[in-house]
Image: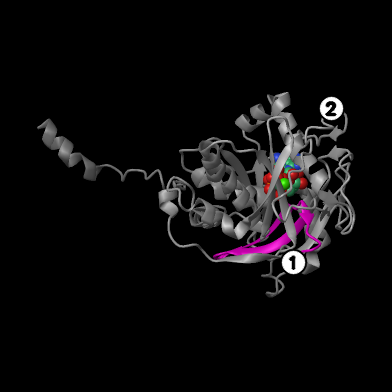
Amino acid sequence: ASSRKRSLDPPDLPPPKNPHVASLRTHPSVYQGSFPFYRLPSELGSFSLDEKRCYHGDARRLRFLSPPAGMESGAASPGWDVMEGFEDRYVRRDEDQKEGLLHILTWVTENRALLRGNGNPEGKRPVDRDFVTWRGHLTKILCSPYESQEGWILAVTLFKGTLYISERETAAAYRKRKEQTREQEKLRYSGYKFESYMCADSPDGAPCPTEVVNTNEGFCSVLLGRLASHSFLVSGEVDCKDPSSTNPSPPSCYVELKTSAEMRSPHQERSFHRYKLLKWWCQSFLLGIPLIIAGFRNPQGRIVSLEKFRTSEISRLVRGDRQSWDPAVCMNFCNAFLGYIKKVVTTDDHRVVFVFSWEPGEDVTFTIEADSDQLVVPDWYVEAISQ
Ligand code: 0WD
Ligand code: CA
């Protein structure tokens, strides 16, 4: 009788809760397929952050590529010491100061006229885009299907028809940052120092490798883009402009600079393709930056070779490796995640924050803060945009 009862049980029970209704999968197999529509972003403006991290609505911190002679032929082995100056000429940005979307929102309030919708006066959005965010946040989303180490938290608010996405530091990222060793900090420095060797302050100037490296400084481009049905305004830090670029209009004239450890074995080369090139591709593709110049450093901290990577050719470099990544998966996942945000975040109120979080191997889930004390869209912005 008991077995008979059990078999009759299910229809009497409420339908089982589907754990996937409120979550989003990230496994690559779910997102295989053709590449979604992605429009090359167009630059709408830019801003600069000075040595004190003060905002300026102009391109004063844009730098210009000034590579050493011989780079084109692959002959250059500059031998630059990218650790030099670490002790006495390094000013680090205070990363305990969480800026959120501050600088983007400042740019938006100063350029409102460029962003207003064309609809009827009641229906139009003050910022006529579906999403506003940093490029770095989108890079994390794109990489998620292949990420096995670091999770993320993205806080989202819907305000006057536009979704604002801002990162929150995870507990693990906080610990990692606080426990950073001197050696790790030196490696970070070497990336910035490489820029000092490669960039000049004017189109026909020369690099000044003895300058102070100050990570407060930066030049950010503000662009409009579209992925499938999602329109967005995105801003990202740009390393330099190539004055000799055949296409002088941004973002096509921009160049991304990277450093990486010199590769000495097929194993190191494979892992460079699988992990580093994934991140490099996602980051530059998102803004439409066509060229990445990499400096490879030896264990003594000297740049031993320079190599150019065309963003559009990177995915071809990894195609032969079946365990590698597929750019279509990254973009299809991003498309799905933005669609998921639109479905979930429907309360238009700047005090309400939807907190999406993800850990490798798990699904994306969210919680809601009805009256958040960590706003994505701050009160000053609400006031400024309503003027
Ligand atoms: O406070 C934070 N947690 C973050 C701040 C996280 C991500 C970005 N930012 C700031 C950056 O300081 C920058 O001003 O946002 C601005 C632009 O960011 P993005 O372009 O969206 O960010 P991303 O693509 O991750 O980084 C671009 C460059 C980096 O180049 P490399 O080659 O290392 O990927 O921005 C720099 C760095 O040069 N950068 C930072 N500089 C200072 N502090 C930071 C940081 N925390 N993160 C990236
Ligand atoms: Ca860089």
- The colouring scheme, among rainbow, by chain, secondary structure or one colour, is one colour
Q: Secondary structure at mark 2?
A: loop
**Numbered label attached to residue 45:** none
Count how many numbered circles sit on residues in the image. 2
The answer to whether residue 236 is magenta is yes
Q: Amino acid at mark 2?
A: Glu
Q: Amino acid at mark 1?
A: Leu
Let me know if residue 378 appears in the view: no
User: Which quadrant of the figure contains the C terminus?
Assistant: bottom right
The boundaries of the magenta stretch are 221-247
User: What residue is drawn where x is 69% and y is 64%?
Assistant: 224
Q: Position of residue 282 (x, y in %)?
A: 60, 52
Residue located beneath label 1 in the image? 115
**Numbered label attached to residue 87:** 2
The answer to whether residue 231 is magenta is yes
Q: Position of residue 150 (x, y in %)?
A: 56, 36
Q: Quadrant of ligand 1?
A: top right
Let me know if residue 385 appears in the view: yes
Residue 272, quarter of picture: top right
